[in-house]
Image: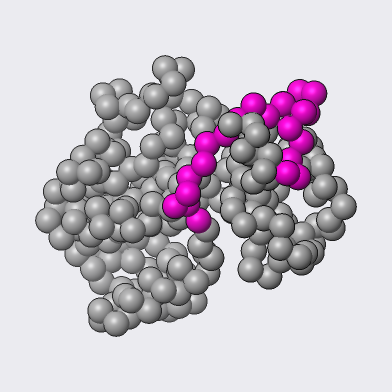
Amino acid sequence: GRAELKRMLPYLDFDNGRFPIRGGLYHKRGGTARHDAVAWGFARGADQQGVDLIQNCEVTGIDVSGGRVTGVQTSRGAIRAGKVAILAAGRAGQVAAMAGLRLPIESHVLQAFVTEGLKPVLDNVVTFGMGHFYISQSDKGGLVFGGDLDFYASYAARGSLARQEAVAEAAMALMPAIGKARVLRSWGGIMDMTPDGSPIIDKTPVEGLYLDAGWCYGGFKAVPASGWAMAHLLATDRPHPTAARLRLDRFTTGRGLMDEEGKGAQHNLH
């Protein structure tokens, strides 16, 4: 309830004229994870299992012969392969185009911001649905926060000033004290957005070419499950039961579209 929230988060603006806070949802087991640490953890685990990780190696082409993938071209030479998987997040559409495929995905920039280091003030993640805003504090003391997408398709890893302003407005509406902190830097990540807001884990029309993409905002959090499902698909050529509905052709046939809000399949609704 409101009183309990005030005890936990006394620095929020509970009586904001436009978005007064009446209550909230509390997920006690929730937490945060450092993206770089998680990435390196998976890399070390894969290396220990015998996976070859080739760094600084750009894919420049996908070789297809007779409707079947035969390998990839890279900045360090050709790699022959009978199976190739595309897991390129916001760049998935560009990589798939190398095999002549056009994906039902738009790439949009999602900005994040970090302030100067401060004394501990936030020991959890606070999200603000009406402002599409979130904020937490890093172990170095910086407040890390962000908001909604830049609503134009782009591969640029930077965002617009208009969206920065909107995020700042949401921050001040929720937590006015943040106005005293100095923003040190911002960056933009490229989100692979599907029309129905749900991902794709499936075979493509090119034999031997597989796709795991369209995770919208949730790819990082879903990595363990999506990796498990994708590995099953690659090994058996059959979808894992948990990913059986995440078909690529649902956007062609209209069957199985995950339109939870009943508004039709539109990129800009997610």
Identify which residue is drawn at 73% across, 44% down. 10
- Visible residue check, residue 166: no
Identify which residue is drawn at 48% across, 26% down. 266
Please give left or right for residue 131 compared with residue 185 in the image: left
Q: Quadrant of residue 23?
A: top right
Please give left or right for residue 4 compared with residue 204 in the image: right
Please give left or right for residue 14 compared with residue 26 in the image: right
Most foreground residue, 104 or 176: 176
Most foreground residue, 20 or 79: 20
Q: How is the image coloured?
A: one colour
Asked if 66 appears above or below 214 in the picture, the reply is below
Name the spot of residue 136 as percent of width and height, x first.
64, 54
Q: Which of the image's four quarters has the N terminus?
A: top right
Residue extending furthest toward the right: 180
Name the spot of residue 108 as percent of width and height, x first.
58, 43
Name the spot of residue 186 as percent of width and height, x first.
72, 57
Identify which residue is drawn at 33% across, 66% down. 72
Asked if 77 appears above or below 29 in the picture, the reply is below
Which region is colored magenta? 10-31
Identify which residue is drawn at 67% across, 43% down. 7
Magenta span main SS: loop
Most foreground residue, 149 or 94: 149
Most foreground residue, 153 or 46: 46
Name the spot of residue 50 as percent of width and height, x first.
25, 81
Q: Is residue 12 magenta?
A: yes
Q: Is residue 142 magenta?
A: no
- Visible residue check, residue 201: yes
- How many marks overall? 0
Asked if 192 appears above or below 42 in the picture, the reply is above
